[in-house]
Image (cartoon, helix red, strand yellow):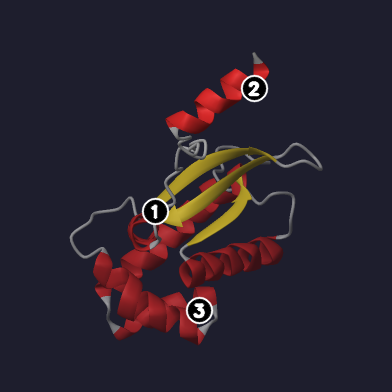
Amino acid sequence: MRHNRDDKRFSRPLGHFRCLMANLTNSLFESGRIKTTVPKAKELRYYAERMITLGKAGDVASRRRAMAFMRNKETVTKLFDEIAPKYKERNGGYTRILKIGYRPGDSAPVSIIELVGEADSAVSEAPSKAKKKKTAPAKKAVPAEASAKKKAATA
């Protein structure tokens, strides 16, 4: 029976669910933001924030616990050396979930989950593509003599 259980496994076996969360966590830390369904993003938030908290501790035991979950040495190294130090002064809330609409095939709600500092720096680094107001090309100035000749010719 499922009395008072808080886990969501998305109708998968436990091993499949753990691999799913590990792969999503790896992708999030590698790219800074990923697009997935809203329920997966909400569940991923829990695991990603736990890994960042381990990264903030920075000791060998924390590194081994992160490695046991994520199973990707490069991503764990990036987590401990680059990502976690950015959040030393922050107590939780390392991720942000932005709902972006519905998937065309099955109308599943889709969202973007991103690391809080990553999106802000990516926006500031990108060149601003402000929409320029289109103006009509300037008309050539016609000398007064030519316009007077035209009027005389038509009259």
From the viewer's perspective, tell me whether residue 103 is left or right of residue 99: right
Q: Amino acid at mark 2?
A: Ala
Which residue is at a point 77% across and 41% down the rendered structure image?
A: 104
Of tags 2 and 3, the one toward the viewer is 2
Above/below status of 28 relative to 103: below
From the viewer's perspective, tell me whether residue 59 is left or right of residue 136: left
Q: CA distance from mark 1 to mark 3?
A: 41 Å
Q: Around disc 1, counting alpha carbons within 10 Å, would you say few (fewer than 14), some (14 to 19), or many (20 or more)?
A: few
Q: Is residue 5 visible in this depiction of the protein? A: yes
Q: Amino acid at mark 1?
A: Ser
Q: Mark 1: which secondary structure? A: loop
Image coordinates of residue 60 in percent, x first then y, are 32, 85
First in sequence: mark 1 vs mark 3: 3
Q: CA distance from mark 1 to mark 2?
A: 52 Å
Q: Mark 3: which secondary structure? A: helix
Q: Mark 2: which secondary structure? A: helix
Q: CA distance from mark 2 to mark 3?
A: 91 Å
First in sequence: mark 2 vs mark 3: 3
From the viewer's perspective, tell me whether residue 32 is left or right of residue 82: right
Q: Which residue is mark 3?
A: 68
Above/below status of 99 relative to 86: above
Q: Amino acid at mark 3?
A: Ala
| Front in this rendered view, residue 40 or 149 | 149
Image coordinates of residue 23 in percent, x first then y, are 60, 69
Which residue is at a point 39% across and 53% down the rendered structure image?
A: 128
Q: Which residue is mark 2?
A: 153
First in sequence: mark 1 vs mark 2: 1
Q: Which residue is mark 1?
A: 128
| Front in this rendered view, residue 135 or 8 | 135
Image coordinates of residue 28 in percent, x first then y, are 51, 64
